[in-house]
Amino acid sequence: MSQNINFKLFLYLISLLFFSYFFLYLKYPVPNDSTISEWLINYEGGFTKRGIIGQIAIFLSRTFDQNLRWIIYILQIISCSIYFILLFNFLKDIKHNRLTLLAIFAPIFILYPIAEIEVLARKEIIVFSLYIAYLFVPKIKYFKKISFILFLILAVLVWEPVVFYLPLIFLIELIENKISKINFDFFKIIFLFIPGIIVAFYIAFNPITSENHDLMSNILKNEFGETCYMSCALLKSKSTILDQLNPIDAYTFERVFRYIMIFLIGFGPIFILFKNSILINKNIIFLKNFSSLFYPAIISLLPVIIIFAIGYDWGRWVNISYVFTAIFFFYLFKNQYIYLNQNIKNNFLNKMSKKIFVFLFIIFCFGWNPKTALTGDIASFPGYRIPYKTLSFFIRGHL
């Protein structure tokens, strides 16, 4: 069964990677594309948040005398390719049940950025890849620890809200290192997080000045013919944390209720898995008094509420939160730090006939997805829309 699932997962990821290439190719020449705007942020006007990738793009553009937007497109293609390769190697050879299949093929996981192309190849994909790559690093004395420090610093420089997901990462470190009490080994793990957190604090409290932003914008315009718009422009108008807070009237009952339901339904399978997950080592600090990983996972996600308070891209935040949560669960499960109790075998999904489960699988995994923005409604049937748009372009020459 494992080899059969691996092959289907491979086909699924290859298909999504093809659609990623296709939609990125359509997006990159669009003057107001949201993804490109984020990749234009750079250090030409001085240090600023999320500028490292844009600076690399500018360096490559100057070095090879190529159009900056084309360079960004190539970097996005490379980023997506690396992510999908890492993801396949991370998810393959897992001992599957019906819940793990629903969790992996959930519409708020791998499928989401292709269903909502405003999210496709945003910078968090680099952070996901960095973290998965770190989890593959062999446990060789100081090599693993140095790798973690570098991973976190680089991740913060790429996309600083990664700090809100550190509790999940911290739990993995506690479990993997078998930390049972507050001792020297515990503080060694704490130390690993400090350099990245310092960089995050520096970014948060040292926003780019108006003059430096103008300098960056002028270099983009005069040297590369690019306008500093959307995400790039927001560095100036929303430079501080307080500036980024959403207005109270954005939180209507309808919107908040919609996203509560999206969260409960989308995370449903993985929450059930957490509820039935038991640590092999029951002596891990902070986890000793919990019968499963459900409440520790929920508590670890609480800081993410801050992201929802400072940005409108709630669908995107759901996707990012799910990716980190899925990495957390499947890493522990695949490496046998946890096991699933007998309730999993007796859950209602296993009592369904194969035909009914396949129907449920298709509806749940390919029948819906949240829109990117808080104000957006639920989108329907991404499993149909994505190939339909692609075929329409090849047949008609436009979407």
Image (cartoon, rainbow, N blue to C red):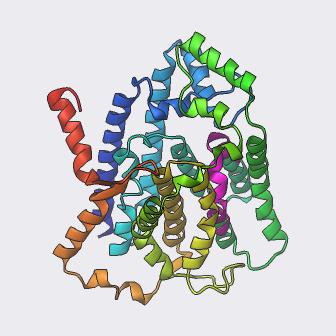
Quadrant location, the C terminus: top left
Which residue lies at the image location 47% right of the left edge and 55% below the top edge?
Answer: 319
206 is higher (above) or lower (below) than 183: above
Which residue lies at the image location 62% right of the left edge and 40% below the top edge?
Answer: 158
Quadrant location, the N terminus: bottom left
The magenta region covers 153-171
State the residue lying farthest toward the front.
Answer: 249
Viewer-side residue, 240 vs 146: 240
144 is higher (above) or lower (below) than 67: below
Which residue lies at the image location 66% right of the left edge and 59% below the top edge?
Answer: 166
Magenta part, dominant SS: helix
State the residue lying farthest toward the left.
Answer: 395
Whole-percent x, y for residue 70 in the image: 45, 22
The answer to if 276 sits in the magenta stretch is no
Whole-percent x, y for residue 263 in the image: 45, 65
State the residue lying farthest toward the right.
Answer: 184
Residue 256 lies left or right of residue 203; in this view the side is left
Which residue lies at the image location 59% right of the left edge and 66% below the top edge?
Answer: 301
Whole-percent x, y for residue 226 in the image: 53, 18
Q: Quadrant of residue 270?
A: bottom left
Look at the image and tell me whether residue 97 can be seen.
Answer: no
The answer to if 169 sits in the magenta stretch is yes
Look at the image and tell me whether residue 366 can be seen.
Answer: yes
Viewer-side residue, 306 vs 358: 306
Viewer-side residue, 191 vs 385: 385
Whole-percent x, y for residue 60 in the image: 57, 21
